[in-house]
Amino acid sequence: MSEGIQQSITVLKGVGKETADNLQALGIETIEDLLFTFPARHEDVRLKDLAETPHNEKVTVEARVESEPTVFYTGRKNRLQVHILAGRYLVKAVFFNQAYLKNKLHVGDTVTITGKWDKGRQSISASRIEFGPKTQQMDFEPVYALRGKVTKKRFTTFIQTALQTYQEVIPETLPLFLREKYRLLPIVDALYAVHFPKSVQHANQARRRFAYEELLHFQLRIQALRKLRLNEEGGRAISYNLPLVKALITRLPYELTGAQKRVVNEIFRDIKSPYRMNRLLQGDVGSGKTVVAALALYAVVTAGYQGALMAPTEILAEQHSVSLAEWLAPLGVRLAMLSGSTKTKVRREVLAHLASGEIDIVIGTHALIQPDVEFKQLGLVITDEQHRFGVSQRRILRDKGEQPDVLFMTATPIPRTLAITAFGEMDVSAIDEMPAGRKVIETHWLRPEKMSAVFERLTLELQAGRQAYAICPLIEESDKLDVQNAVELYEQLASFYEGKFTVGLMHGRLPTDEKERVMRDFSNGDITVLVSTTVVEVGVNVPNATFMLITDAERFGLAQLHQLRGRVGRGEHQSYCVLLADPKTDEGKERMMAMTATNNGFELAEKDLALRGPGDFFGRKQSGLPEFKMADLVEDYRILDVARQDAVDLLQRDDFWQNPLYTPLQEMLKQSGVLDGERFD
Ligand code: ADP
Ligand code: MG
């Protein structure tokens, strides 16, 4: 393919050494890279009438210059202002830091200006100017994310040259039958349409093709992975002792919900089967995942295997230890805990016992994934609140021991599109039912001025014997300012309730044993009101707590607010959640309203995704979400569904690997490394 698009960008006419370096800085090394650098969006540059343009909207006008430009300087910055006549409108055009335009604009000239229309000021804040009438062939201009020295104009020329020179040799990567099925543009047409669209529809056609292709490729990779796992040799069939597990179930203080029974069955089927479990267990906060985890861990222990449960925080690990010990220690199960603060001597002992098999179940934090932690016979690994862990951390634990079964638990309901993207190669179980008798948490959104009224309501609750959380935002664990917030609220509440109720303080900067003491005191009722940063966010379970006050609630995302709210409503009493917030943005207001409108985690998750986009949903870089060039997980959910189904169908065809019809897809899979067991999660 020496003549192909894999060639270096330098073969292109007009690209010298310096330009090549500049393009390389944008990640463009080959002709192919250049052609597939898609615009971030298309800008509408059709001429518009100002009378019909809403305030703050982008507009393009053809206009006559009516005044000599004036330039204002402030420090290093400058602002150029000129009057123009656009249609019947005499308005101002404003340019920032483009003083050089002063000598280019003369009364009587015709110019074409694009910018943001300020209706009140009757001015256009210009982002683009063309001298003369609108010459543009295109009504929709691609906007590329260009940084540095390459101008838009030259970039466009390069793409045009590349397309014209190489269109004969650009390989078609999407099989014809799929293009026909969905009426998708052939690759060359699609490239023209995305870089030089004739209309919005034209650009959209290109988008549709590339989005489908990207999602299909992605789905093929994860479905191939899943297929491999199910056929994998080396997974183990663990024959647990069913009567023992059943005996434990009857000893529980409650009956399992229908949903819990169902997911226990799904998990147990995986444990028993010879392939390796790789399952995601979703269940809203309070749906009762812990007991499910305990049953699964116990099951492998009855077969002589070890189990590990990893939690994202020490508090949570501690709490799981307590719950599991309560259920399992009487049955002779040997448990241990391992965290960052485990004393060296104890740690050494635990490690020795894990290696010798004298410990059956270990519960812990990140400390579990250190390289020196070895197991005798690890059968099952469970990670709780798994979205909190980085992808690589999840992987390390999974790779410990020989092919242990893996269960990820999450209380963050994940919208379907994200679930099948981030966790597509996993099987999914969902606890979609709450334990009986739970009351709906009443949620209120109040302005911060209402604080004293909130205190009064809180007092009533405390007098009735209940407990409460008061949460302050925390962006970074190390953020001094945020700790300060918590300390202030603590002092305020402590003096307010002095001699009546005990107020405790919890934040990430406390020493570990202090954190544990506070948590224990709150748990057994010695502390009535717990002021805390978000360290209590995940998992903590104190059923007598019925009042959740969240200050500066606008600083939290929906998923986190819902998690926090889930700390109450865990017992038999009516619970309340009060959001004190003064959101400045519409998005902030929408979040508060969404919280008061529903208690349903899945609904909130969909809303969160719509408000914040997929990148922010899981928290940056942690998501395991692939980066798509064109596909958008919010907009393109229908395409995703179709692509997923196609991927499943394709891989099920007996002739998939032989038929030349599928050559480009076979190639893609081979190159992806998936088939060599290289996992990309
Ligand atoms: P999460 O799914 O958020 O981890 P937990 O496992 O902490 O939820 O359970 C929340 C609360 O519900 C706990 O107090 C637990 O004892 C209780 N619980 C769990 N399952 C049931 C059930 N089937 N019936 C009644 N209460 C239950
Ligand atoms: Mg939990």
Image (cartoon, helix red, strand yellow):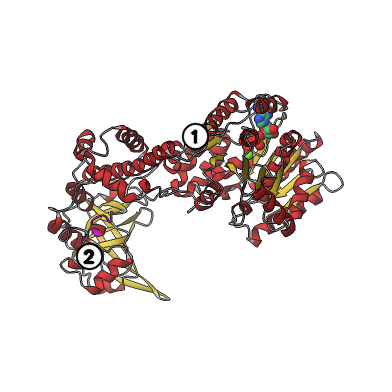
Picture coordinates of residue 327, whole percent (x, y):
72, 34
Amino acid at dot 2: Ser
Q: Which residue is mark 1?
A: 274
Q: Given the image, on which type of amino acid does mark 1 rest?
A: Pro
Nearer the N terminus, badge 2 or badge 1? 2
> Can you tell which of label 2 and label 1 is closer to the viewer?
1
- Residue lying at 20% horizontally and 42% vertically, measured from the top left: 185
- Which stretch is magenta? 34-38
Q: Which mark is residue 8?
A: 2
**Total of numbered circles in the picture?**
2
Q: Quadrant of ligand 1?
A: top right
Of 19 and 242, the residue lying toward us = 242
Residue sitting nearer the eye, 317 or 455:
317
**From mark 2 to mark 1, how far is it between C-alphas?**
49 Å
Magenta span main SS: loop
Where disc 2 sits, the SS reads loop
Which quarter of the rendering shows the N terminus? Answer: bottom left
Mark 2 CB near ligand 2 (8 Å cut)? no
